[in-house]
Image (tube, rainbow, N blue to C red):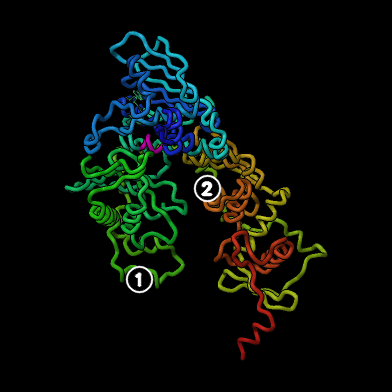
Amino acid sequence: MAGIIQLLPDRTANQIAAGEVVQRPASVVKELLENAIDAQATIIKLYIKNGGCTLIQVDDNGTGMNAFDARMCWERHATSKITKADDLYNLNTLGFRGEALASIASVSEVEMKTKCAQEDIGTRIIIEAGNFINQENTAASQGTSIAVKNLFYNIPARKNFLKSISVETKHTFEEFQRIALAYPSITFEYYNQGKNLSKLEGGDLEKRINDLFNFKEGELIPTNEDTDIVKINGFIGTPKISKRTRGNQYLFANGRFIKDPYLNHAIISGYGNLLEEKKHPFYILFLKVDPSKIDVNIHPTKNEVKFEDGRHVYTLLQSVIKKTLGTHFVLPTDTQLLNAIDTNPSQNINDRFAAVNNPNVDQSFNPFGNKKPKTPTNWEKLDAILNTPINPPEQQTFFSQPEKLSESTTHNFEIFQIQDAYLVAKIDGELSLINQHRAHRQVLYERYTAQQTVSSQQLLFPRTLELSKSNFALYLEMQKDINALGFDISEFGQSTIIVNGLPSELSKEDGASVIIQIIDDFKTNLQDLKIAKKDALRQAAAKNAAIKTGKILNQTEMQVLLNDLMACKQKTIDQSGKPIMVKLTKQSLERFFQ
Ligand code: ADP
Ligand code: MG
């Protein structure tokens, strides 16, 4: 009697597997780049169109495949990398499951051209939604080119889950960046909409890091440790360059990027109290263990691994970080640190730290020993000459509409400032306490939201700023909206921008570099708050342009600020629900004296 259980057809099984392997365009990028690396390519080019939704193409100059393999590689569980389960514990390749290509082909339209050294002619293959359409001979040079078009076109439900083109583009670039970091000897190129956004010549890790990030000399510390259990090498950032966003943390195990909260914790705890609260350090660390001591087959995306000696790896990693920071800075004792904190509470932890240890800090230390000193560009030279102040700069005032004071609607409050942070004011006969930073932040946020013309001041001498590649991509995306906030910025070369003008509430001294902070906060807002992009940008801009806690305000400034706040739609709590203003009512005052 026939039962009710049936084997799923291959195409269905592939589509189900694709659910795990191919979550978004960036997953395809990862699989194709990894295959090119496994094929020993030395030059790899990635082409993205519309966030990878219409095209992801990887061209490599690796081994290529013969006509048989070219057909075979699209079958489920087809791999040249392992032949038996035991091989998993002696793995020297990134792939091994033999399911990526089959999964990708089941949810897209694929065109591949490939040729290996042993054959004179190449092969071209077309597959649509897992259906084999055509195979023919074609002229090709050695290597493989795989174009994945219209991802998820046959699975609308998956397609609908994709984020905006810019978010998907960002993910593809981040994946590209991770793989490029792990394989610095390979030349990588990234093209978006036909435009080359990144060309990374093969070299060593220092060169790759320099090409991808804009670190200054001394901001990274080299790490190197060789133990029986694990070899650790790479670079960690000084506590000073830690950020509020977690973005730049790269941990690789045997050449693959891994996400490992446990080991991340080891690194953070290695920094100990050198890190300010809620700050994340930069790191690029490579762990190398005997392949038999690591299980990489935990998840189809192969982003997670399990170490046989997990606890040891944790402890070693933690102590390596401590040691690295220690030899670089000479760590202070706890008492020294405490003393430093007590005598000068206004300094941040890094300055306090430096204050204790200055005599021992090797200021000239440079992890990139062979790096040539950077020759200033003409812009920088001009900038340096022109920006040398002849007279001390005038005190910049934060408010942009002083004329408001004379308006008839303006109220003159009884008001004073305490602790350079709070305003104490009598409003409608009641005692109110106002957080000055949050108040100004709200004022600016509402001004940006109302899309009032925001006043901008032109800089006499424009400033150039270099952004990291991913920040530059974000900048390009939000360019219009950023300029609508009162910035006047234009692009200048690959990842450099020129700031010609600033919102008038920003002081000229810190104004230009605030843009980097705004982009960083914008990223965090998008990730954490899941709010619309424009809103995330406005909030980030308001936060960074607002007067800071610690700024002494004169009477006029306080009056303007309070009047502006009273004109806001939302005066008592800010966008994240934190209080801006608290009122001490008669009843609450009476309660104090009961
Ligand atoms: P895996 O990488 O796990 O083996 P894939 O589905 O990613 O599985 O690839 C299947 C096989 O196709 C690989 O084992 C390899 O032999 C071949 N292959 C894939 N991409 C390339 C490439 N760019 N160059 C040469 N061979 C490739
Ligand atoms: Mg693979």
Instruction: Residue 388: tell me if it is visible.
Output: no
Label 1 Cα crowd, 10 Å radius (few <14 / some 14-19 / many 20+): few
**The image quarter in which residue 121 lies:** top left
332 vs 38, nearest the viewer: 38
Above or below, 316 against 56 in this view is below
Residue 188 lies left or right of residue 310; in this view the side is right
**Residue pictured at 46% horizontal, 32% vertical:** 15
* Residue at which label 1 appears: 338
Residue 10 appears at what percent x and percent y?
41, 28
86 vs 271, nearest the viewer: 86
> Magenta residues?
176-181
Indicate yes or no: mark 1 CB to ligand 2 under 8 Å: no
Residue 118 lies left or right of residue 479; in this view the side is left
Q: Which mark is residue 523?
A: 2
Q: Quadrant of the N terminus?
A: top left
Name the dominant secondary structure of the magenta segment.
helix
**Residue pictured at 35% horizontal, 52% vertical:** 264
